[in-house]
């Protein structure tokens, strides 16, 4: 395995830009771009919101684990991970065994602005989505900080964010041991 083919996993809270940054990086690295939510939706034939509504969040978390364990290629991909994918115990270790993990980060106010008015996220389908987002952000912040190098995505042009992530990826991929 060449260093260049080690998978890159982008983690971080909803609305931090994992898909946008991931797509851009995949182009630059000539890797395949994969979005965990989309792959799960494709496999299940329904949107994430329907999986949550019909089968519950715990089932969705199982699907995320299956996707990481055996649902994507072992090398040559940039994977944008759903925001909660790293939360269940053991998931971060699993990701780290498979590639370089980099966390995208943005302040809660920027996240609120970006995603408050989107409608496809099941966790925000509550009476007060801003309150829910703040609670989740507070609950998960420490965990995200432990995931790996954090790259700030707020108020920075995409090409600068992508260049920053790529620098970190190259350093960490060179030291990566399976
Ligand atoms: C979730 C984040 C979503 C999606 C699901 C749950 C979470 O992905 O997986 O709605 O628990 O934070 P994005 O981070 O791509 O929005």
Image (cartoon, grey):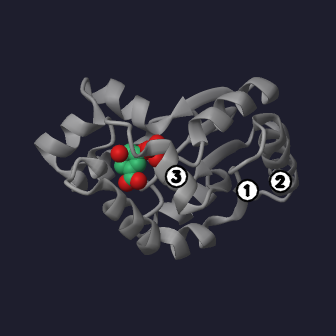
| Horizontal side of residue 59 vs 77, given as left or right | left
Asked if the residues shown at circle 2 and circle 1 are in contact, with their CB atoms under 8 angstroms apart, the answer is yes
Q: Which residue is mark 1?
A: 151
Asked if the residues shown at circle 3 and circle 2 are in contact, with their CB atoms under 8 angstroms apart, the answer is no
| Mark before the other along the chain sequence, 3 or 2 | 3
- In this view of the protein, can residue 76 be seen by the observer? yes
Residue 28 sits in which quadrant? top right
**Spatial separation of the CA atoms under disc 1 and disc 3:** 15 Å
Q: Which residue is mark 2?
A: 168
- Relative to 69, residue 177 above or below: below
Say which element carries label 1: strand
Query: Which residue shows up at 73% across the image and 48% down it?
Result: 155
Q: Which residue is mark 3?
A: 111
Of 94 and 85, nearer the camera is 85
Query: Which residue shows up at 11% across the image and 41% down it?
Result: 54
**Spatial separation of the CA atoms under disc 2 and disc 1:** 9 Å
Of 41 and 99, nearer the camera is 41
Say which element carries label 2: helix
């Amino acid at each position: 395995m060449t260093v260049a083919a080690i998978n890159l996993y982008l983690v971080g809270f909803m609305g931090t830009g994992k898909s946008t940054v991931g797509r851009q990086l995949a182009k630059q690295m000539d890797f395949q771009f994969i979005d965990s939510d989309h792959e799960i939706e494709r496999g299940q034939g329904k949107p994430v919101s329907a999986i949550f509504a019909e089968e519950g969040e715990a089932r969705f978390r199982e699907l995320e684990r299956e996707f990481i364990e055996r649902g994507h290629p072992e090398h040559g991909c940039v994977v944008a991970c759903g925001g909660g994918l790293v939360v269940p115990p053991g998931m971060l270790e699993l990701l780290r065994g498979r590639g370089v993990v980099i966390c995208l980060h943005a302040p809660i106010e920027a996240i609120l602005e970006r995603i408050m008015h989107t409608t496809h996220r099941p966790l925000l389908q509550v009476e007060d989505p801003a309150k829910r987002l703040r609670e989740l952000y507070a609950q998960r912040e420490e965990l995200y900080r432990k995931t790996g190098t954090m790259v700030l995505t707020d108020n920075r042009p995409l090409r600068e964010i992508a260049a920053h992530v790529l620098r970190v990826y190259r350093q960490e991929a060179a030291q990566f041991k399976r």
